Amino acid sequence: MALMDIRDVLNSMGIGEDEIVFAAMELYFPHPGVETREKAENKFRLEMNLALSDPNLALLIYAGVLLESEGVRGRLPNLKPSDYENDLTCLIADEVLGLAIAKYVGGYKGLFDYVRYDKAKPGILGRLGPFMDDVIAGLIGGVSANMYTRAELD
């Protein structure tokens, strides 16, 4: 049996690497080591590929994929389908998952970047469901934090 890659899972959901990078670059700001958007995109792609090679991160993302899938089917325990569809503010499991991903990838700096992306919902984040918007915002937040931190070191 072939090893499943989280990138393939995301691609099957219409969440490609280019869409993730585009969303990340919508909130890009010049910084030492990533003075241009082109440098930032390249550095972000490198950091994202490094992060996505981690099986623990892949499993956290996959948890969001499964929750989203069950939510679409109206099969989330103790949650009415209409509550899932409306992404009620009392539903915080999606936020907790996004925060966990951001902190796992980028530490406390990742948490701050996650909040920026979660609030602004640039690019694909504005089109994703209640769980996946936070999962991908967490990924972008963590990767962005690493991009800016490590860019200073190069």
Image (cartoon, helix red, strand yellow):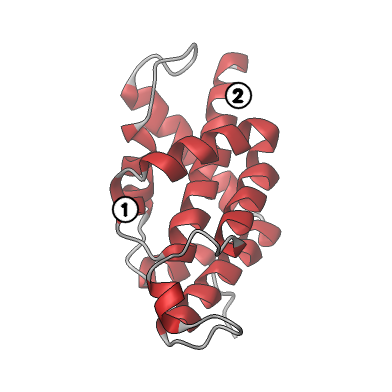
Q: For the view shown, which residue lies furthest in the top direction? A: 32
Q: Which mark is residue 126?
A: 1
Q: Residue 131 versus residue 38: which sits nearer the camera?
A: 131
Q: Is residue 5 left or right of residue 121?
A: right
Numbered marks: total: 2
Write down the residue under mark 2: 150
Residue at image position (70%, 36%) is 107
Residue 78 in the image, given as x and y percentages of width and height:
60, 83
Three-letter amino acid code at the position of disc 2: Arg
Which quadrant of the figure has residue 85? bottom left
Residue at image position (51%, 88%) is 75
Residue 88 in the image, given as x and y percentages of width and height:
46, 64
121 up-or-down from 153: above or below:
below
**Local crowd size for mark 2, using a 10 Å CA cut-off: few (<14), some (14–19), many (≥20):** some
69 up-or-down from 140: above or below:
below
- SS of the residue under disc 1: helix
Three-letter amino acid code at the position of disc 1: Gly
Residue 21 in the image, given as x and y percentages of width and height:
37, 42
Residue 27 in the image, given as x and y percentages of width and height:
37, 30
Residue at image position (32%, 26%) is 38
Of callouts 2 and 1, the N-terminal one: 1
Q: Residue 47 versus residue 79: which sits nearer the camera?
A: 79
Marks 2/1: CA–CA distance? 28 Å
- In the rendered image, which quarter contains the N terminus? bottom right
